Amino acid sequence: MMETIVPYVSVAEARESTRKVQVKGQLVQGSVQIDHTRLQTRFTIQDAKGDLLPVVHPKLAQGNIQDATEVVAIGQMKGDVFVAEKILYKCPSKYQGKEMQEYQESSQ
């Protein structure tokens, strides 16, 4: 069971980890790049300590990720980039209590 738990870590801890982790941070405004040729989404998040993490998601993000305020990236480091197999993001809303939107493509 312990192998299925994916811990939340800071950007610094994610950079040192060799296993799958969850990193939460603020989306750096203007960092979202959706590459329709490579079918991937790139962005940068900043954690509570101010550390920046470049993230690549090997799918095209759906919805309004550019408007996200918070992002959770689930995956692991590959070199200097965090490769997220799954991303969750929260966008500002006029509706109080709106939950984070989840985006995950099946790997098939």
Image (cartoon, grey):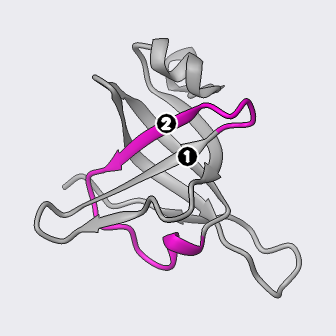
Q: Amino acid at mark 1?
A: Ile
Q: Nearer the viewer, residue 74 or 79?
A: 79
Residue 73: percent from left, percent from top: 51, 44
| Horizontal arrangement in the rendering, residue 36 relative to residue 9 (left or right) | left
Percent x, y for residue 98? Answer: 78, 74
- Name the residue at 49% across, 36% down: 53
Query: Residue 38 or 74: which is nearer the viewer?
Result: 38
Asked if 72 appears above or below 65 in the picture, the reply is above
Other residues around mark 1 within 10 Å, as few (<14) / some (14–19) / many (≥20): many
The total of numbered circles placed on residues is 2
Left or right position of 7 against 99: left
Cα–Cα gap, marks 2 and 1 = 5 Å
What residue is pinned by disc 2? Answer: 53
> Does 88 sit above or below residue 45?
below
Q: Is residue 53 visible?
A: yes
Q: Residue at x 45, y 58 (%)?
A: 31
In this view, 14 is above or below 75: above
| Residue 3: image location, x then y, percent | 49, 18
Image quarter of the N terminus: top right
The local secondary structure at tag 2 comes to: strand
Reading the image, the residue beneath label 1 is 45
**Where are the magenta residues, as a range?**
47-67
Which residue is situated farthest in the right direction here? Answer: 96
Q: Residue at x 19, y 55 (%)?
A: 108
Which residue is drawn at the image coordinates 83% and 85% (left, top)? Answer: 95
